[in-house]
Amino acid sequence: MNPQSTSQFSSHLNFTERKKERQREMGASLLPSPPFVGAFLFVLSTFFLFPELAIAKDVGITRHYKFNIKLQNVTRLCHTKSIVTVNGQFPGPRIVAREGDRVVIKVVNHVQNNISIHWHGIRQLQTGWADGPAYVTQCPIQTGQTYMYNFTIVGQRGTLFWHAHISWLRSTVYGPMVILPKRHTPYPFAKPYKEVPIIFGEWWNVDTEAVISQALQTGGGPNVSDSYTINGLPGPLYNCSEKDTFKLKVKPGKTYLLRLINAALNDELFFSIANHTLTVVEADAIYVKPFETETILITPGQTTNVLLKTKPYFPNANFLMAARPYVTGQGTFDNSSTAGILQYELPSNSPSSIKMLKLFKPALPPLNDTSFASNFSKRLRSLGNAQFPANVPQTVDKRFFFTVSLGTSPCPQNQTCQGPTNSTKFAASLNNVSFAMPTTALLQAHFLGQSNGLYTTDFPNNPPSRFNYTGTPPNNTMVGNGTKVEVLPFNTSVELVMQDTSILGAESHPVHLHGFNFFVVGQGFGNYDPNKDPATFNLVDPAERNTIGVPSGGWVAIRFLADNPGGGMVHALPPGSPHQLGFEDGVGCPRWKAPQSEAASSTV
């Protein structure tokens, strides 16, 4: 995707008219789905049959993509560096498919780094080995090696994205996924004139692998980025960046669907377009009850579709579309704003030029506006109608209570660290357990019956000790570590409450669940009260998501059905601590062990 171009495609693409264009833009080839695909996946993966998969095999097509992982020189902020890319593009190529399509991506690694690709938000029903987290569902793809990701999109439509899932390579290896409705199925809102992916990211002038390597060695927070980006471009608010500005060119009196994606590593972002109102219609590839807002909040890993209705006449002005971070913790952060420009098409008889027009800037919330963040999140509700029901588990088989904390671990002997003290490192944890990344892929080991000693099944359902989670923190901030999993029987209905703590300071924690969507049934500030708070849960039309921000100084409750055999990882985005929720079946890659240093850096 050329970041300076406005991506245009119809919401109801005609296959015969668009086939050549897709092949040219995205390197995709389109083939009819072979009738044996559903049965083939059934035999390989599990003995549970999903009725929706049986239906999916009879519709859609197979779409083939090729991802060449290669180095590419890229210049931003007057700094040129060689970065890891897909097909030499930054951001990477757009994947377009329809609900029910099978997607096959051949990834060929031409760089020295090991690589894996995660298809963020794809359910991966019966195809857990295609999910992508290195050392969890697969071994990484080594230099000169190839891996084929093969999955069917079942019951999903909307905006998702893909990114590298090893170390910090996803700072440059990411791109949008557009999932259109089934053919002849309209959107539950008026058909937009055009659709535009807008993907937020970050740019470092230095090598990001060196940044995370230094942070892991010293135990301090990683150095912050030099800029945020919109479609790979920092925009005019940074020095030496005016020419690297995304420009969205629009016509008066039209409605545009903006597919917003937060691919930034660390930061939740506010986003607004000056003098324009946005209508939110989808979140994490799930339709929501539409509502209007001037600003949205989007967490790393989240996607949000909004309708932008342009002014009915040429406004004789340009408008900044800007994003900046929402910050709650005490650590360092990139206190800057990225911006693009919304440009109206000049009338043919206009004496003005684009450069002469007045430029309006949006008013974004304060950096720490937790009230706005909470209220925005509460406005998101599923459509919950007959066509798009909210199938919230009404009863619960298994309950979990996770504290999400930033604690400490001891500094190695004869080394000075940069954590809270020079003898400690920062360490993220769930229920006081920091995940120890294995050197062998967990799903592979389970499938081959070789998991003895690789992980244990004793992950705690509750914190090891109770305390005033959002009050005065305990004196002991040390966390344990281990490769621990929780095994869930198939079709278990789960309720998980995630509680922020004040240990080393309260902050918002973005959390992503692999292999599942979940319903956000409740949230609040302070300590979760299991006797009172469940009475406030929304079990009718809660938002359905794959990524959620645990509120700063508060809690969030989610429910989901464990109907997807495989390794479902729940983890915070960096700084993060992944944990496994169960194993039932799957397929691994050729056996080998990775260097411990790489495994240790693969925490997100």
Image (tube, grey):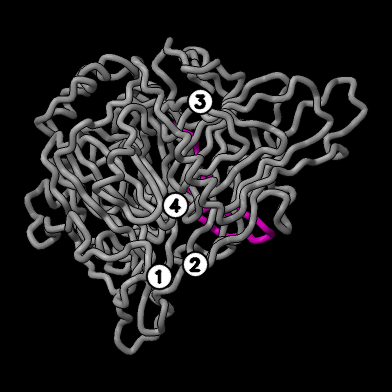
- The crowding category of the residue bearing disc 4, from other C-alpha atoms within 10 Å (few below 14, some 14 to 19, many at least 20), is many
Of labels 2 and 4, earlier in sequence is: 4
Q: Quickly name the residue at label 3.
A: 290
Mark 3 is surrounded, within 10 Å at the Cα level, by few (under 14), some (14 to 19) or many (20 or more) other residues, namely: many
Measured Cα–Cα span from mark 1 to mark 2: 8 Å
Badge 1: how crowded within 10 Å, few (<14), some, or many (20+)? some
Is 409 magenta? The answer is no
Residue 532, numbered circle = none
Q: Which residues are magenta?
A: 70-95
Say which residue label 2 marks: 330
Residue type at numbered disc 2: Gln
Label 4: state its secondary structure: helix
Q: Nearer the viewer, mark 4 or mark 1?
A: 1
Sequence-wise first label, 1 or 2: 2
Residue drawn at 33 percent across, 38 percent down: 536
Q: Are marks 4 and 1 in contact (CB under 8 Å)?
A: no
Was residue 80 drawn as part of the magenta stretch in this picture?
A: yes
